[in-house]
Image (tube, rainbow, N blue to C red):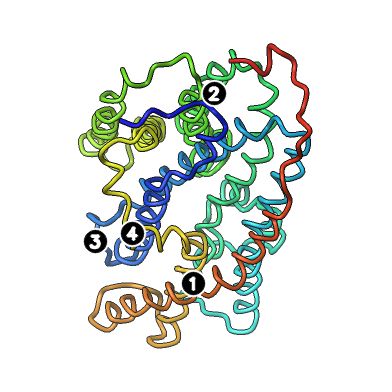
Amino acid sequence: MVHVHSSADAADRRIPALDGVRGFMTIAVVVSHYFAEVPSGIPALMFGWLAVNMFYVLSGFLIARLILNKGVHENFFKVFYIRRVCRTFPIYFACVFLIFAITALWPMHNTFEGTTFPLHAYLTFTQNIWMAQTGSIGQHWLAPTWTLALEEQFYLIAPALILFTPRRHLASVLIAMCAFAVFARGWVLLYSDLHEYWAAVLLPTRLDVLAMGVLAALLLHMPKIDWSKWDLWLRAAPLPLLVIPMLLKLLMGDDSVLFKITSPLFVSAACASFLMALARGAPEAKNMQNRVYDFFCTISYAVYLTHLIVLGLMHNIILGVAPDIASPQQIAVTLAAIPVTVAVSWILTRYVEMPITNYGRSFKWSKELRQFDTKTATA
């Protein structure tokens, strides 16, 4: 295997296999939402939950990798948040305003479900809090955005947490965060009268999936660990870690409280181990590198935001019903929505996301370095 050095130069290099993971998981989300998570859906294709967990772990991993290597720059916080805003805000806000405009001008009750959230819930990235409080997903087409809200909330605390926690204690803090999330889910589901969304969509109860990605990046960043001795374990660990929650689901059912409490931890640990193996140059990395996955990685953010919008619009305009695959006509419209989603996402990526993201990248890391307390900065 390729040894991953702890130097900033090595850490700055892109890992093509991780781009492939993002592309593959983007496809998985679309397949799950289009063909499984509809009234007549195919249960075997319902693996969007796994993709979402992988997105979280991958996001935590990449952000931590960046912070660990660029956090020493004096202007880190300024550049980090400017780049983050340029990367995530433009397409997101465009989609939010589009949905609210469509709702106002052309209500389509066959497409929207549950309680309607106010515009400011989406503009402030607090729709996940509204979901927990109302027990509703809100506007159906914007339902996936709760995951983005959770990420944005995490990004408010992650840089300071990683940079100002003494490095020798950071792993312990991250493990404690994982444990806290498990106990928080347990309390919500076992001892409270709160809706189960409180255990599924809020940052305190989902900290483990993001913290696990940060922990994975931190461990690979530690020069004292000889990872060549652990490569086989990293490759082997994901399977048993995924089998445990799957067995719980099969034996105890979808509504098993134990499954809901523990599965995010096991799944995120499996995802983290898999990402670490890929970053280490495991043979599996080659399977994640191809043009299809790379293409979907490039347009992944736009696809994630627009695929339900496209699906809902096409089913309403063409058939006058909510999305489903119960009839040949509905299947045909769903299949047609895939290339339309890809085309719309490519246009948004090429002409909106990329130019503004490139503008964000014009803000460079300063040559001046931040002065840390020795105990904080050292591993």
Please provide percent x and percent y for residue 347. Answer: 53, 75
Instruction: Say which label, 3 or 1, has the lower sequence index.
Output: 3
Which residue is pictured at 40% across the width and 48% down the height?
Answer: 16
Q: Which mark is residue 346?
A: 1
Type of amino acid at the residue the image marks with label 1: Trp
Instruction: Say which label, 2 or 4, has the lower sequence index.
Output: 4
Please provide percent x and percent y for residue 139. Answer: 55, 65
Q: Which residue is mark 4?
A: 32
Instruction: Say which label, 2 or 3, has the lower sequence index.
Output: 3
* Up/down of 265 relative to 305, above or below: above
Q: Is residue 112 shown to the viewer in this render?
A: yes
Q: Secondary structure at mark 1?
A: helix
Marks 1/2 in contact by CB < 8 Å: the verdict is no
Q: Which mark is residue 301?
A: none
Label 2, residues with CA under 10 Å away: few <14, some 14-19, many ≥20: many
Type of amino acid at the residue the image marks with label 2: Leu
Q: Which mark is residue 42?
A: 3
Q: Nearer the viewer, mark 4 or mark 1?
A: 1
Question: Front-most of 267 and 300?
Answer: 300
Type of amino acid at the residue the image marks with label 3: Ile
Q: Which residue is mark 2?
A: 174
